[in-house]
Amino acid sequence: MLQELKEAYGFIFEEELLKEIEHTGVLKIAREGEIIMNINDYISSMPLLLEGAIKILREDKEGNELLLYFLERGDTCALTLSCCLGQTKSEVRAVAERDTRFIMIPVSKIEEWTAKYKSWRNFVFESYHSRLTEMLETIDTLAFMNMDKRLLRYLQDKAKINQSEELQVTHQQVAYDLNTSRVVVSRLLKRLEMEGKILLQRNSIVVHEL
Amino acid sequence: MLQELKEAYGFIFEEELLKEIEHTGVLKIAREGEIIMNINDYISSMPLLLEGAIKILREDKEGNELLLYFLERGDTCALTLSCCLGQTKSEVRAVAERDTRFIMIPVSKIEEWTAKYKSWRNFVFESYHSRLTEMLETIDTLAFMNMDKRLLRYLQDKAKINQSEELQVTHQQVAYDLNTSRVVVSRLLKRLEMEGKILLQRNSIVVHEL
DNA sequence: CATTTGCAGTAACAAAAGTTACACTTTTCT
DNA sequence: AGAAAAGTGTAACTTTTGTTACTGCAAATG
């Protein structure tokens, strides 16, 4: 584990903290599509991503979903962190976007390290900053953009996160993430294809403009 | 200042920290409508609200606006905090919702106190938590609600923040906050009035359902 | 191989939101 | 007082998004 840990966090944390993480943290693996954390779950530890990607979703009472953002190697989830410290339930769902490896750190250590290591404090604040920024971007897309632009942005983000121009998704899955209907997605995708920005195949979308 | 400070923060911070705040902080006053902080401003201090209310707005390149949330007594702006620590420009605009009194704390102290006072750490984390939660609620309204519900919610929030059922606003001002057009706001307000939920007058809206 | 199931395309229509235009009233300014 | 400006109400229309319904195709299943 140490090797992997150093690759992802070696430039951020000092030797001593890395050792503490290796000692206290628990390595976890999630398969693509697996629910890592659900809405209303009690949270007692936070994840440090080593490999893979996680998507964070919001859901309302009627079961409508919306993708908030993705997490990658070197990221942690500030919402989780926030929940941990406040002892509240999770406000979001976390699903493995692909096979993912991460280390779980118990709450007690989070507080301890915040007082003890400056690099940890910086990491925590940096993490809050990133997540707030991503939430702002999500708000921008919802408030200022039409569905066609939101859709293209979504495809580009997803391609980047999966490090592949070819996305293995159905129109229905895209519709869930954007909280719209399958028919709307199909319609707009067809338009994007005619504009030459993407290529449509069964169960897959190839994104040209990255 | 100490008296006011104790009223708003006495239950959160210890005596010693309150004295430090009184010593280092600078008292500021903003008149209703005044821009306290603008997009792309460099930020070197964070506000602690003593009295009044501040609204936080987002803007896109075309100049479209959207209200994100309100700050009240006892609040601070986590986005500001985030900007301070990361040395980045402000992502949002802060406007005094009514006459407001607040204390500005320089960045240097923020870092110092984070290491020194547990109560300060808790306050900072609690603040991040509140702001993240409010951003999530904003996202909920945008993603899951139609304009009529968003409008009613907005009126209720605004009434609460201003501690008055009667809001002194024009339809155009409401339209700016919700990023829609004046005509749409007038139309939906009329419907809300017919449903008996509000009362419309020139330059003012009385909210019945709180 | 026949049947079922999941996925995509598309038409037709409905609802929500945005736009343009204009009338009318109240307030402000000269 | 008279003119201009600001605020509101409403009609008519367009665009965007959501909904329902049906088609055809491909993959999976028995």
Image (cartoon, coloured by chain):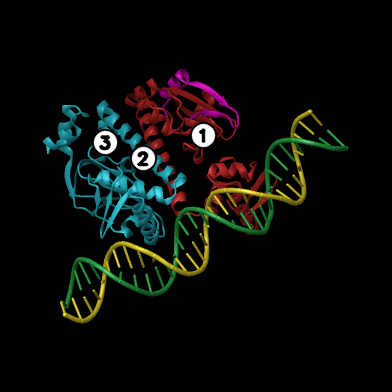
Chain colours: A cyan, B red, C yellow, D green
- The residue under the point 34% across, 29% down is B118
Q: Is residue A126 visible?
A: yes
The chain letter under disc 3 is: A
Label 1 Cα crowd, 10 Å radius (few <14 / some 14-19 / many 20+): some
> Can marks 3 and 2 be said to lie on one chain?
yes
Which x, y percent locates residue B2? 51, 23
Q: Amino acid at mark 3?
A: Ile
User: Mark 3 = which residue?
Assistant: A110
- Alpha carbons under labels 1 and 3: distance apart: 29 Å
Kind of residue sitting beneath label 2 = Glu
The Cα–Cα distance between marks 2 and 1, rounded to whole angstroms, is 27 Å
Q: Residue at x 37, y 25 (%)?
A: B87
Q: Chain of mark 1?
A: B
Q: Position of residue B72 (x, y in %)?
A: 51, 36
Say if mark 1 contacts mark 3, CB within 8 Å.
no
> For mark 2, what is the residue?
A134
Q: Position of residue A143 (x, y in %)?
A: 46, 45
Residue B64: where, in percent of width, then height? 51, 40
Q: Which residues are magenta?
A: B12-38
Tag of residue B73: 1
- Three-letter code for the amino acid on which mark 1 is drawn: Arg
Q: Around disc 3, counting alpha carbons within 10 Å, would you say few (fewer than 14), some (14 to 19), or many (20 or more)?
A: some
Q: Quadrant of residue D13?
A: bottom right
Q: Nearer the viewer, residue B181 or B129?
A: B181
